[in-house]
Amino acid sequence: MKKRYKFISWNVNGIRAVDKKEALKWVDDYNIDILGVQETKSQKDQIPNTIFNKEFSFKTASQSKIKGRSGTALFSDINTTFDCTCPSVDILDEGRINEVHFNLGEKNIAFFNVYFPNGQSSQERLEYKMEFYDRFLNHCENLKKDGKSIIVCGDVNTAHTEIDIARPKANENTSGFLKMERDWITKFLNHGYIDTFRLINGDLKDKYSWWSYRANARENNVGWRIDYFYVSEDLKDFVKDAYILDDIFGSDHCPIGLEIEI
């Protein structure tokens, strides 16, 4: 008998700050099977198991070697068979990845929760972002060769097409919407991965997941869609819904969701 699973991803921009705002309370009643959070800005031991009233059966986290930066955490009610922070991709040890494996039906899933680098601060960081992208793609491809199905959630820090950003022309020379960054997403998709939001919603416009804190950007919906759920092509027919929860506040990002039935 098939079961429906709900996955949520959210760049919280500081999990302790969001917790203090009580902006995580909605999680308790949302029947989430896996929650991936990015940019926790916390060490592993600073993320308490009691951050939600809901008790997830499994928690894992990554932390940056520089305290107060990056960081990811994954909370799950699905039994995992493998858990790592992907040092072959996150080579600078910035706390950017959770990788867990589990079985759903006949599928052996590799699930990634990723906070991809931002390239805006310098040319060096942009180059590292592109290197990180390629290392991640290579890692996913190797897992597919081993028979894994892939699910990726997280903050990719790039808007793919002009309908994924409110002001494309004004940002065409800004990291996050550079041609080389957008071309990488195209390359990733061409390797057999699916942007689930576009799969379900087609060319729906004016749906974003990040807004600057400046100039009332969120109130005016001047945003970017830079948070994604990707699945490998073999999971396409199992995708039942994909959405942006832009009515949930607490961060400069909003949560996004994916539901599959398998």
Image (cartoon, rainbow, N blue to C red):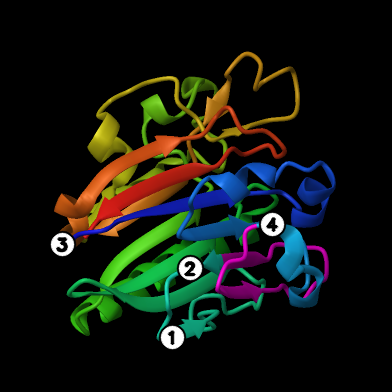
Q: Earlier in the sequence, mark 1 or mark 4?
A: 4
Identify the residue at horizontal 45%, vertical 60% (top origin): 33
Q: Are marks 3 and 4 in contact (CB under 8 Å)?
A: no
Q: Foreground: 152 or 245?
A: 245
Q: Which quadrant would the C terminus be assigned to in this image?
A: bottom left
Our reading of the magenta stretch's main secondary structure is: loop
- The kind of residue on which mark 4 rests is Asn
- Residue 77 bears which disc, if any? 2
Give the residue at mark 3: 234
Secondary structure, mark 2, is: loop
Q: Earlier in the sequence, mark 3 or mark 4?
A: 4
Let me know if residue 239 appears in the view.
yes
Tell me where the magenta segment starts and ends, as one range. 54-74
- Residue 216 bears which disc, if any? none
Q: Earlier in the sequence, mark 2 or mark 4?
A: 4
Residue 43 spot, x, y in % from top left:
78, 72
With respect to residue 2, does 202 lie above or below?
Answer: above
Give the residue at mark 1: 82
Q: Is residue 67 magenta?
A: yes
Q: Foreground: 246 or 209?
A: 246
Crowd around label 4: few <14 · some 14–19 · many ≥20 (10 Å): few
Q: CA distance from mark 3 to mark 4?
A: 35 Å
- The kind of residue on which mark 3 rests is Asp
Q: Foreground: 175 or 31?
A: 31
Q: Is residue 213 left or right of residue 201?
A: right
- The kind of residue on which mark 1 rests is Phe
- The kind of residue on which mark 2 rests is Asp
Secondary structure, mark 3, is: helix
Residue 50 spot, x, y in % from top left:
74, 64
Q: CA distance from mark 2 to mark 1?
A: 14 Å
